[in-house]
Amino acid sequence: MNLIDVTIVNVAIPSLREDLGAASSEIEWVVAGYIIAFALGLLPFGRLGDVVGRKRMFLLGVAGFTLGSAFCGVSPTTETLIAARLFQGLTAAMMMPQVLALVQVTFPPKERGFAFSFFGVTAGIASVAGPLAGGALISADFYHLAWRPIFLVNLPIGIFAVLAGWRLIPDVAPGRREPVDVVGVLFAAATVFAIIIPLVEGREFGWPLWCFASMAASVGFATAFVFWERHRERQRATQLLPISLIRNRHFLLGLAMTASLFAGIPGFFFVIAVFLQVGYGYSPLESGLATVPFPIGVFIASLIAGRFGSRFAKARLIAGPLVLAAGMAGLSVVVSGVTDEIGHWSIFGPLLFCGLGMGTTVAPLFATILTVVETRDAGSGSGALQSFQQVGAALGVAVNGEIFFGTVGRAASGATAYRDAFGASIWYEVAIFLVLALLSSRLRTGIRHGGEAGEGRAPAEPAPEV
């Protein structure tokens, strides 16, 4: 529900604007408000799950997200829809860090690889299912509800998830109750806010000076956050993000890898939707169907990856991005030969190949990074990973959008302008996935898993080289 709701609104923008009489800036906040609230809440709610119990926090998050979806679906005005989206984003931040944390503390090491592969299937399919599901629901126009079913569809899913989660998720003892690191929460929120806001809003306002000033300020906030967490450690007080993780080179490299991967995928699906719909006249549903080969590839590769468990993790983390880069290069070759129309089948092969690369990468990525996170800090580690995932996604959309729309503005009018713009943005994708492969080659493997659930231990630095 969360991953789909990040993208599903994009295809509903024309319907939203017409039905609610919303201005462009208001519609922008319907999209951006969710992303900002979600990114701000990941780290504190991840830590809170470690303290009060991950199952409880997950179920509260799912219940809140379902309620927020209902509020979105019945919103009578743009202002109430924006408020509901902010609430939805915060509750998504409550549930999402608990997912990876529950995998980390529930499954023994030999089973985690397979569990993470299913997470990879979900993440990969959801990355493109939003536009497809949104297009189908809007085209069906159930009971003349226009855009509202894209939110209301979450109600039966959310109710089922709460009931099934209450019954099936095992109870894992929470950590020791300690005071919340309020100052750490404020510094972390300021850091994320200072990065996300200019990346989300920059292109709309033409990249004014305040965007760059805000991103520069984020460095200061991040530095203050680290100094504060070190102070908390010296005081033997609980930390929002344990200082042991901040000092751990393996974990920090994992954060950079996560940001790099997600700096590619969401931005790519943003520009391919515009390329197909605006440049070549595809409907939202046709555009979604054209990208189906990607989740098919993710599904196939993730199931195969599950059979490997944690074996050959480093090799797979290098191979996956290289396959992604090769698939993108192949797509560039196909697109360069397009003239006045483009068929579904012409992009089927490259998108399938890209999906295979994504599925090969996602499962070992999260599983390998979280090997150094102690069980008691699983929520914090998961929240940090997903915070960097959101920052990477916002960065990727901003860079891809700037390349794409900048090229459209400079090129000749018509479909060829969109073809040239899409081709230019693809080479950004190739570059970012090559960077990810390079980062993966710097990983130290052979790091011990935390042991059976409840016995997680982070290795001493430096980690052993294999």
Image: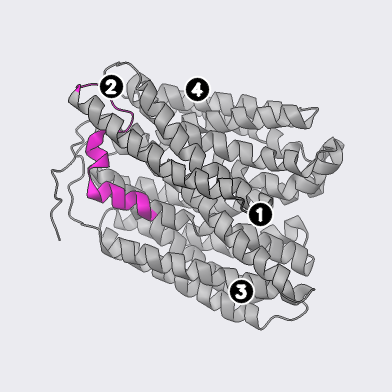
Report whether residue 414 is seen. Answer: yes
Q: Which is more toward the observer, 326 or 433? A: 433
Disc 4 designates what residue?
60
Which of the two discs, 2 and 1, labels the residue nearer the N terminus?
Answer: 2
Under mark 1, the amino acid is Gly
Disc number for residue 455 = none
Quarter of image, res 281: bottom right
Cβ atoms under marks 4 and 2 closer than 8 Å: no
Quadrant for the N terminus, please: top right
Marks 4 and 2, how far apart at CA: 18 Å
* x 32%, y 51%: residue: 254
Q: Which residue is mark 1?
A: 206
Residue for badge 3? 423
Q: Is residue 242 magenta?
A: yes
Q: Amino acid at mark 4?
A: Leu
Q: Quadrant of residue 291?
A: bottom right
- Measured in 3D between alpha carbons, the distance from the residue under mark 2 to the one under mark 1, in whole angstroms, is 47 Å
Highlighted magenta segment, given as a residue range: 235-257
The secondary structure type at the circle numbered 3 is helix
